[in-house]
Image (cartoon, rainbow, N blue to C red):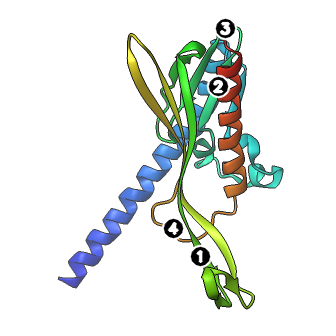
Amino acid sequence: MNDTLLVLAGIGGALYIIYFIIMGEKNKKTIPLFENKMIRRGFTRRVVVYDFLSESKKSSVNDYFRHSWFVGIWLNYPGKMIAIRRDKDIWEEADIPFDKIQSVEIIKDGHTITTGGGIGAYGLFVGGATSKEVIKELQVRIVTGDIYSGTMSYIINLYDSTFSSKANPDMKAIKECARSIADEINNIMNHAD
């Protein structure tokens, strides 16, 4: 019985590795195709997490995972449109005319971990205690619509780490991307004709 479970675990692991290699090769080829498509469609500016990573991080990103960093928005200012790539596993963009954008917000689901020291009176950290925020999920929500069609929301999943309790060292870049997307959307809402 134990040998059978061991064999099944080995087969499952091998299938996972094969799937990982096939999907990695597909995603590696898809990034330049997607970028070229967006440029041909007039989306000449982008705001994606990859652009906010340090140069050393960019050079160390494995080709199989690079697609995870190309989530965000593409902008076509002359055509007054944005295109959204909502998730690392979705390659179909959603197009939104500037005049349909109603609001934007950054959604963060996280908690704070305190290490060292302790908590004193009134919940203050004392005795050399340090804390760091651990974010499990960081999203940007864009709401569109008008009086005739109602509203619709688009969620951009910039970061999702359901199974990790560690702080992501790239969180600064991910947060800056979220703020930049919100800044672009607010600028569009304030200045769209």
Cβ–Cβ under 8 Å for marks 1 and 3:
no
Neighbour class for label 4 at 10 Å: few (<14), some, many (≥20)?
few
Relative to 67, is 15 on the left or the right? left
**Mark 2 or mark 4, earlier in chain:** 2
| Amino acid at circle 3 | Asp
The quarter of the displayed image where residue 187 is located: top right
Q: Nearer the viewer, mark 1 or mark 3?
A: 3
- Three-letter amino acid code at disc 4? Ser
Please, what secondary structure does the residue beneath circle 2 have? strand
In the rendered structure, which disc, 4 or 3, sits on the residue that comes first in sequence? 4
CB contact under 8 Å: marks 4 and 3: no
Q: What is the spatial separation of the Cα atoms under label 4 and label 3, in whole angstroms?
A: 44 Å
Where, by quadrant of the figure, is residue 118 drawn?
A: bottom right
Check disc 4 and report its element: helix, strand or loop. loop
Q: Quadrant of residue 152?
A: top left
Whether residue 3 is visible = yes
Front in this rendered view, residue 109 or 163: 109
Q: Residue at left 51%, top 35%? A: 86
Residues marked 1 and 2 touching at CB (< 8 Å): no
Marking on residue 193: 3
First in residue order: circle 1 vs circle 4: 1
Disc on the earlier residue, 1 or 3: 1
- Looking at this view, is 51 or 191 the one in front? 191
Rendered image: mark on residue 113: 1
Mark 1 vs mark 4, CA separation in Å: 13 Å
Q: Secondary structure at mark 1?
A: strand
Residue plotted at (54% across, 32% down): 85
Q: What residue does disc 4 label?
A: 164
